[in-house]
Every structure is written in structure tokens, then in C-alpha cells.
Amino acid sequence: MTDRPSTRERRLVATRRSLAEHALRLFAEKGYEATTVADIADAADLSTRTFFRHVRDKDEAMFVADEDVFDDVVAAAGDRSLPPLARLLDGVRALAASAEKDPDVKCARERVLEENPTLRARELAQQLRWQSRVEEFLVGQGTEQGAASLAAGLALTVWREAYRRWIGDGAVVGTLGHHLDTVIGELPGHVAGARIHPG
């Protein structure tokens, strides 16, 4: 049984979510360059000073709520009886269920990222941090370093490809899990087709 989040923790999560939602909406409506920190803070009903207590800049405002999602992914990967990659894919499925709650928002987010290389670079950097944290999580629970690194990299690759296909197909609710299954099913074929050269 897990402890329930405190009132303060729930408020922090709500504030981060609000910042991310307003940052995305303003980037989509006004454009990334035209949107200021003051615009985002005002939309979220925060002072600029309070804004900077939560995030460092306007880029981070769009991604700060993702950290809460990451915690849910790790929590869903808790079955130590499974191999490392299988555990992480359980976490990825939890992420898929979360992503499908707001398909229109996810599509708008992807458009903003496509139009702004600075934000896309920020997203990729965040994903690499996630990969590193997942690797540390597995190692901390007894997984060998190489296996943990490979599992973390594969899980991220599976997620990114399934998500890309889902967005490309119009982000239809109930289909992201199918895209995950398809990508996972393709992995053995890619591995079987790889040649191992004698050392």
C-alpha cells in the first residue's frame, strides 16, 4: 500500500500541469517566440516570481508535468519477476494509457514541437534523462549494468516509434496500445536479421 500524496504534493502536481497546459496553448496560439514567461505565468494565475520557483524558463514550463508521468511509468515497472525489458514495457503501457486521455492536446503538442527546433531538442534531452534514470532504477534493483542500459534504450525506442505512428494515424483513442504491440512484435525480426561478425 502506497502513501497518498500530501496536499502540498498534489498542489505542486496541479501547478506543474497548469504551467504545461498554458505554455502549450500559448505556443500554439501566439507562437513560441512571441510567448513570454509573463504570458505563461499570467495564464496560469501565478506571479512571475512563483513561475521561476517551479521552472527555469519558458521551455521547461512545457515539459515540467512530464516528470510526474515518469514516476507513474517507474511505478508500473515494479514486477521484479519479469525480465528488465518486459518490466519497462509494462511502464510504457501505463504511459500510453495516460497519453490517450488527451489526444487533441498531444497532437497540438506535436505540432508545436515540429515548428520549434529548440523545444524538440529539449524534448530529446528530457527523453535521454529518462533513459538514464530508468537504467539507474533497474541497476538499483539488481539488474546488471549492460542489461539495464539495453532495456532502457529499447523501451524508449519502442515508445517513440509507437507514439510517432499513433500521432501519424490521427491519435485515435484506444489504438496506441495496438501500435505498441506492433512495434514490439517487429523487434524479433530486426534482431534476427542482424549479422554478428566474428571478433
Image (spheres, helix red, strand yellow):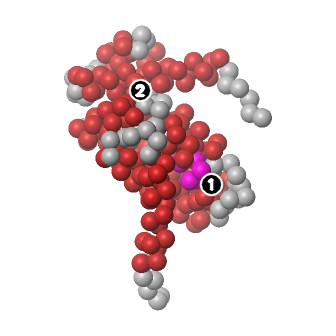
Relative side of 63 to 146, left or right: left
Instruction: Indicate whether 109 appears above or below 47.
Output: below
Q: Nearer the viewer, residue 51 or 160?
A: 160
Relative side of 61 to 34, left or right: right
Which x, y percent locates residue 68? 54, 33
| Residue 105 location, quadrant | top left
Residue at numbered disc 1: 87
> Residue at point 56% right, 53% down?
89
Q: Which dot marks residue 67?
A: none
Q: Secondary structure at mark 1?
A: helix
Which x, y percent locates residue 25? 32, 23
Q: Are marks 2 and 1 in contact (CB under 8 Å)?
A: no
Which x, y percent locates residue 131? 50, 51
Asked if residue 175 lies in the magenta stretch, the reply is no
For label 2, count other residues whose C-alpha is less than 10 Å away and answer few (under 14), some (14-19) or many (20+). many
| Residue 31 location, quadrant | top left
Q: Is residue 121 visible?
A: no
Residue at numbered disc 2: 20
Q: Amino acid under label 2?
A: Ala
Which x, y percent locates residue 64? 46, 31
